[in-house]
Image (spheres, helix red, strand yellow):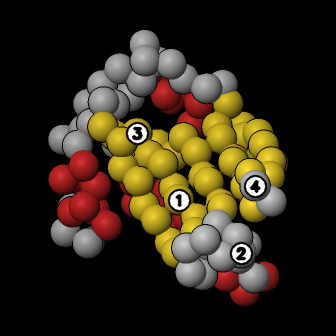
């Protein structure tokens, strides 16, 4: 059973506010979408593990961004991830990075094993 979420996590999930940062690193575009407010160590107490999920859609060092179809598929994937992991605040999505042929979702959680069970449909 998952412990009740820290008040700051529950508030961030309820507000569901995001910012986007864009930049070029050696000519390669980088997009960072992150939940605000950014929660520091005190704000994520009890969520001491990071779960990173990577979706490579092009070869590394290609500098590629996802196509429209890939973006749609990734949006659906993200919705499903959040539906399974954030349901009872077991985990929360803190940031999404898109750069150089890959997208990465960064979740905070207390139990990566439970996340795995949920993603496998065994929870």
Between marks 1 and 2 in the image, the one whose residue lies nearer the viewer: 2
Instruction: Specify which label sits upstream in the sequence, 3 or 2.
Output: 2
Between marks 3 and 2 in the image, the one whose residue lies nearer the viewer: 2
Instruction: Specify which label sits upstream in the sequence, 1 or 2.
Output: 2
Q: Position of residue 107 (x, y in %)?
A: 44, 46
Residue under the point 42% across and 61% down: 53
The residue at which mark 1 appears reads as 104
Along the line of sight, the residue nearer the viewer: 89 or 30: 30
Element class at badge 3: strand
Q: Is residue 101 left or right of residue 23?
A: left
Q: Cα distance, mark 3 to mark 2? A: 27 Å
The residue at which mark 2 appears reads as 64
Instruction: Specify which label sits upstream in the sequence, 2 or 4.
Output: 4
Residue under the point 50% across and 29% down: 10
Q: Cα distance, mark 2 to mark 4? A: 13 Å
The mark found on residue 26 in the picture is: 4
Q: Cα distance, mark 4 to mark 1? A: 20 Å
Q: Are marks 1 and 2 in contact (CB under 8 Å)?
A: no
Q: Position of residue 44 (x, y in %)?
A: 42, 24
The residue at which mark 3 appears reads as 108
Quarter of the C terminus within the rendering: bottom left
Instruction: Specify which label sits upstream in the sequence, 4 or 3.
Output: 4
Quarter of the N terminus within the rendering: top left
Q: Cα distance, mark 1 to mark 2? A: 14 Å
């Amino acid at each position: 059973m998952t412990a009740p979420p820290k008040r700051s996590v529950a508030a961030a999930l309820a507000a569901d506010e995001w910012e986007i940062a864009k930049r070029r690193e050696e000519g390669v575009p980088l997009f960072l979408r992150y939940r605000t407010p950014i929660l520091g160590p005190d704000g994520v107490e009890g969520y001491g593990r990071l779960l990173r999920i990577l979706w490579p859609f092009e070869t590394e060092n290609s500098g590629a961004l996802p196509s429209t179809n890939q973006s749609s598929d990734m949006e659906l994937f993200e919705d499903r991830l959040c539906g399974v992991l954030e349901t009872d605040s077991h985990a929360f999505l803190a940031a999404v990075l898109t750069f150089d042929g890959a997208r990465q979702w960064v979740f905070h959680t207390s139990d990566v094993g439970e996340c795995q069970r949920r993603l496998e449909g065994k929870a």
